[in-house]
Image (cartoon, rainbow, N blue to C red):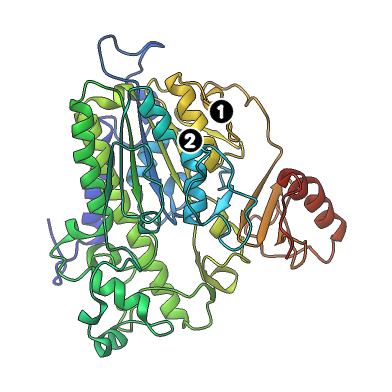
Amino acid sequence: MSKKPNGALTRKDFLKVAGAAGASMLGAAGCAGLADKVPRLPEEYLPGSAGPNVILVIIDSLRRDHVGAYGNPWVHTPTLDAIAAESLLFTHAQPEAMPTLPARRAIYTGMRTWPTSPPRFGWSSIPPGQRTLAEILGDEGYSTSLVTDAYVQFPMNFGRGFGMYQEIRGQENDPYRDPESVDEKAMHRDYIILGEGKKARQYLANVQGRKGEEDYFAPRVFSDAMRALERAAADSRPFFLVADCYDPHEPWDPPEEYVALYDEGYNGKEPLDDNYGSDDYLTNRQLLRMRALYAAEVTMMDRWLGKFVQRAHELGVMENTLLVVLSDHGHCLGEHGYTGKPPYALYPELTDTMFMIRHPAGKGAGRRSDFYASTHDVAPTILSFLGVNQPEPMDGQDMTPLLVGEGPERPRDHITQGYYRYICVRDEHRVMFCLSDMTDAHLFDAINDPDQRRDLAEAEPDTVKRMYEEYAKRDAAGRLPNF
């Protein structure tokens, strides 16, 4: 394979490798027309085989518009695109609450986290009265495994019910290694440093000593998930396995061969991290570099996800396994003048998420749904697929009927979500976000202005009030906090 003088794969070489990975991952059918070519199971699963099983993959901070299956023409995501070809793809998925921990609370329990209240705004442990999916399935005789580098959940009780819970240390601000080991002058020389630079210094200390791509976080998550999968496949019990990958969450420092796919000739300080607010601290060139680093992280994550799913096929477990892949929220990269995840910038770059369900019998394969799927729908859907009853009624909905072209039990004509003090509501025609007391309101045309560029709040105050009263206040059941 030809390489550039610096050792990076050329764009042409990488596309060959990535395309091959996408094809081999799901068999000889390749990435095109997979939904029509993969073997289909009968209604009953293979006699004598273990299962049915569930693999749940959570990708942090992955924007929907950075996935090829959702229409992106330039970010390389062959694995996700191949999975999408075999899945029911949700085109209007959004989390019911953000950011990382509130989203995972909903995923693991099937219960809404929003509306949230101060001081934690949902950033807390899973309430004792809410049973987790892992606890329920463990009681039903399933082996349960979680592999994650999402360090913000480590001090919490998000490992409840998992028989095997593996924490991969060192992401972001995880106090894993001594930050004093990083030369502060060199750090300021090489990186755009925000504030006192404590977060950057901690992260750089955490990742010291990496020798190759296998030592980066997404590769570590999916490599360890492969080993967990091998153990689960060798067990006589059916399994529930979660691979929870923090990348492409910032900081961004992917290997050069991935960065070279999206940017070359940059000689400035690297935007390792970003400000949760205005993007005016960056030049246009630095902002382009940030976007390239983010895209590179997406592609590296996708490549190692491919290795994981390919291993699942090699082990033969995908014949009896439901695969659910979703992201928890997105990330602003200079759109609307913001970077990061500021709660007052609930634009599609932050709120629109990826969500796909691959049924082992091919149900729903290659189809799209505009149902307002959300994080609290994951648990009831998985339980329904496995034929396990909900011990207590969950807030989310079972989406398995959608896999066979039926309507949901309770149609949704809108979706409401929250992020700290802000709420966002949308229906077929309008998107509105504001503070929970209806101040600082923004309103957009959902059909003609999907990128949310022209604010209609001043022109349509009655629409703002209607959506607040009929959607936000009603859905909160009188629990909207007052500030």
Q: Position of residue 296 (x, y in %)?
A: 33, 62
Amino acid residing under circle 2: Arg
Q: Is residue 157 above or below residue 408?
A: below
Q: Quadrant of residue 373?
A: top right
Marks 2,1: beta carbons within 8 A:
yes
Q: Residue at the location (58% across, 57% down)?
A: 348
Tell me how many marks there are: 2
Nearest the viewer among 342 and 387 is 387
Q: Is residue 341 above or below residue 308?
A: below
Disc marking residue 392: 1
Q: Residue at the location (56% across, 26% down)?
A: 402
Q: Position of residue 162 (x, y in %)?
A: 33, 38
Amino acid residing under circle 1: Glu
CA neighbours of label 1 inside 10 A, class few (<14), some (14 to 19), many (20+): few
Q: Residue at the location (41% across, 79% down)?
A: 286
Q: Position of residue 414 (x, y in %)?
A: 70, 42
The secondary structure type at the circle numbered 2 is: loop
In this image, 460 relative to 191: left or right? right
Q: Residue at the location (83% across, 51% down)?
A: 466
Q: Position of residue 422 (x, y in %)?
A: 66, 61
Quadrant location of the N terminus in the rendered image:
bottom left
Q: Earlier in the sequence, mark 2 or mark 1?
A: 2
In this image, 453 relative to 271: left or right? right
